[in-house]
């Protein structure tokens, strides 16, 4: 069964067990899905309200984009565990001679790169989610303003969690050019997204 198809209590129990996966990466994707879902909810609570009619077109566009992101982030919950499982599978490969050891090492490096790219892509989606959330501030139903703040908090936690998963895999990758590129791009996304989340949260605090 896919993680995303599990009842909440079953997912949480597996997450808290001694099973190596799901772990922090899937938990980060779940937090991101929760964040964009709250943003989508606020848009839906705004659409059709006379008080916010001048923002109707923007909120409808935001709702559609948030809905698409919601689907992508739900898929990401299983993608992270799948990437981890690819790394774990390499440990089962034979290593009885030099040729097998070299093949095993190549497979491990490829799997580790995949395990770094997966949370990096999650970071990209989270920044987009934060940009959408920011657009809703001041243009959406004020009765649900706190939900936008919670969305920002979930998305920031997800972003930081995804970066931790990128970083831990980069630490074992031998391709220096790959490491430098993803470190540079990842740090940029982390800064951009964290600043967005903090700004959203502060605006909400001042609003309520």
Image (spheres, rainbow, N blue to C red):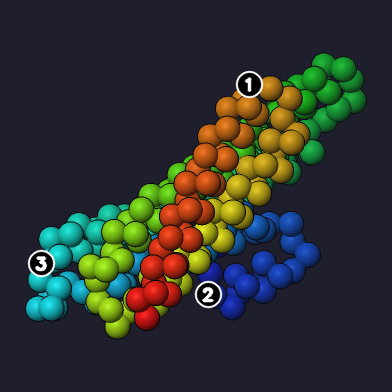
Q: How crowded is mark 1: few (under 14 residues within 10 Å), some or many (20 or more)?
A: few
Which residue occupies the foreground of this view, 101 or 128? 128
In this view, the mark in front (2 or 3)? 3
Query: Is residue 70 depicted above or below 189 in this figure?
Result: below
Which residue occupies the foreground of this view, 206 or 81? 206
- Measuring 39% from the left and 74% from the top, which residue is drawn there? 206
Residue 89 occupies quadrant: top right
The Cα–Cα distance between marks 1 and 3, rounded to whole angstroms, is 49 Å
Report the side of 35 relative to 165 (left or right). Answer: left
Residue 20: % across, % down: 74, 57
Which residue occupies the foreground of this view, 180 or 114? 180
- Measuring 54% from the left and 75% from the top, which residue is drawn there? 8
Q: Which residue matches tag 1? A: 177
Q: Which residue matches tag 3? A: 54
User: Considering only order in the chain, which callout, 3 or 2, is on the residue closer to the N terminus?
Assistant: 2
Report the side of 7 relative to 206 (left or right). Answer: right
Report the side of 93 relative to 161 (left or right). Answer: right
- Measuring 43% from the left and 75% from the top, which residue is drawn there? 205
Query: Is residue 41 depicted above or below 4 in this figure?
Result: below
Quarter of the figure that contains the C terminus: bottom left
The Cα–Cα distance between marks 1 and 2, rounded to whole angstroms, is 41 Å
Q: Which residue matches tag 2? A: 7
Residue 174: % across, % down: 73, 25
Residue 188 in sight here: yes
User: Considering only order in the chain, which callout, 3 or 1, is on the residue closer to the N terminus?
Assistant: 3
- Measuring 52% from the left and 59% from the top, which residue is drawn there? 156
Q: How crowded is mark 3: few (under 14 residues within 10 Å), some or many (20 or more)?
A: few
SS at badge 2: loop
């Amino acid at each position: 069964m896919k993680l995303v198809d599990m009842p909440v209590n079953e997912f949480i129990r597996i997450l808290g067990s001694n099973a190596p996966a799901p772990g922090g990466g899937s938990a980060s994707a779940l937090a991101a899905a929760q964040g964009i879902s709250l943003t989508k909810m606020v848009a839906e609570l705004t659409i059709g309200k006379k008080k916010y009619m001048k923002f109707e077109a923007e909120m409808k566009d935001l709702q559609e984009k948030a809905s698409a992101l919601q689907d992508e982030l739900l898929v990401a919950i299983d993608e992270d565990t799948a990437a981890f499982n690819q790394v774990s599978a390499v440990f089962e490969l034979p290593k009885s001679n030099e040729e097998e050891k070299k093949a095993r090492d190549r497979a491990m490096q490829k799997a580790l790169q995949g395990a770094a790219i997966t949370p990096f892509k999650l970071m990209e989606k989270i920044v987009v989610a934060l940009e959408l959330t920011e657009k809703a501030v001041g243009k959406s139903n004020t009765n649900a303003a706190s939900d936008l703040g919670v969305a920002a908090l979930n998305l920031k936690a997800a972003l930081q969690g995804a970066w931790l998963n990128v970083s831990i895999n980069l630490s074992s990758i031998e391709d220096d050019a790959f490491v430098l590129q993803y470190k540079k791009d990842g740090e940029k996304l982390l800064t951009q997204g964290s600043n967005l989340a903090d700004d959203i949260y502060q605006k909400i605090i001042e609003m309520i």
